[in-house]
Image (cartoon, rainbow, N blue to C red):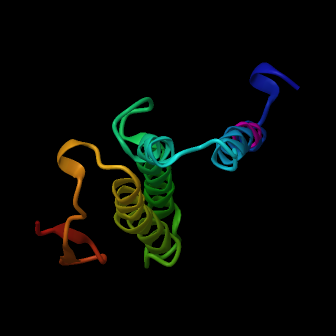
C-alpha cells in the first residue's frame, strides 16, 4: 500500500518503526567500547538541546504527547480529562523529569561552559512543574 491508500495508523506504525531503528542505532553507539565521558555527555545533550529537530528529541516527544492530549480533550465524551490528563502529565514528566536528569548526567560526565553545575529545583505550581531556582 502506498500514497493515499495508506491509513493513518499504517503511517504511524511505519514512523514508529523508523524511530525504533534510529533509537537502536543510538543505543548501539552508547554500548560502544571506545565511548568516553565527553562523547557520552555530547550524545546525551543531543537528546535534549536545541539541535535538529528544534528543542531536541525529548521535547519533540513531549510535544507529540501534548498534541495527543489536545485531541483527546476534544474527543472525550464527558470532557472529564480521563484520557487527556494522563497524556498531559506524561508530557510534563518527560520534559521536567527525564529532560533535567539528562542534563544532570551530561554535566556530571563532562562540563560544557556555564552548564557545569546542576541547577537546584523545587516543585512549582500546578501539574508537578519544576521551577529552576539556581
Residue 87: x and y in percent read 49, 66
Extent of the magenta region: 14-18
Outermost residue, top side: 3
Q: Is residue 29 magenta?
A: no
- Residue pictured at 44% horizontal, 43% vertical: 38
- Front residue (pair 102, 34): 34
Residue 121: x and y in percent read 21, 73
- Front residue (pair 76, 46): 46
- Residue pictured at 76% horizontal, 41% vertical: 17
- Front residue (pair 71, 103): 103
**Image quadrant for the N terminus?**
top right
- Residue pictured at 11% horizontal, 69% vertical: 133
Answer left or right for 116 relative to 19.
Answer: left
Q: Is residue 9 above or below residue 126?
A: above
Residue 57: x and y in percent read 48, 44
- Front residue (pair 104, 68): 104
The quadrant holding residue 105 is bottom left
Residue 2: x and y in percent read 83, 22
Outermost residue, left side: 134
Tally of numbered tags: 0
The quadrant holding residue 131 is bottom left
Answer left or right for 79 relative to 28.
Answer: left
- Residue pictured at 46% horizontal, 59% vertical: 74
The quadrant holding residue 134 is bottom left
Outermost residue, right side: 1
Answer left or right for 11 relative to 34.
Answer: right
Magenta span main SS: helix
Amino acid at each position: 500500500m502506498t500514497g493515499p491508500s495508506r491509513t493513518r495508523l499504517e503511517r504511524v506504525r511505519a514512523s514508529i518503526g523508523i524511530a525504533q531503528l534510529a533509537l537502536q542505532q543510538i543505543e548501539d553507539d552508547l554500548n560502544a567500547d571506545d565511548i568516553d565521558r565527553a562523547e557520552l555527555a555530547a550524545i546525551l545533550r543531543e537528546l535534549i538541546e536545541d539541535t535538529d529537530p528544534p528543542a531536541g528529541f525529548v521535547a519533540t516527544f513531549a510535544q507529540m504527547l501534548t498534541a495527543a492530549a489536545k485531541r483527546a480533550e476534544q474527543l472525550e465524551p464527558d470532557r472529564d480529562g480521563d484520557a487527556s490528563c494522563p497524556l498531559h502529565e506524561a508530557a510534563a514528566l518527560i520534559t521536567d523529569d527525564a529532560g533535567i536528569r539528562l542534563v544532570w548526567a551530561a554535566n556530571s560526565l563532562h562540563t560544557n561552559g556555564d552548564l557545569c553545575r546542576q541547577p537546584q529545583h523545587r516543585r512549582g505550581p500546578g501539574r508537578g512543574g519544576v521551577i529552576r531556582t539556581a
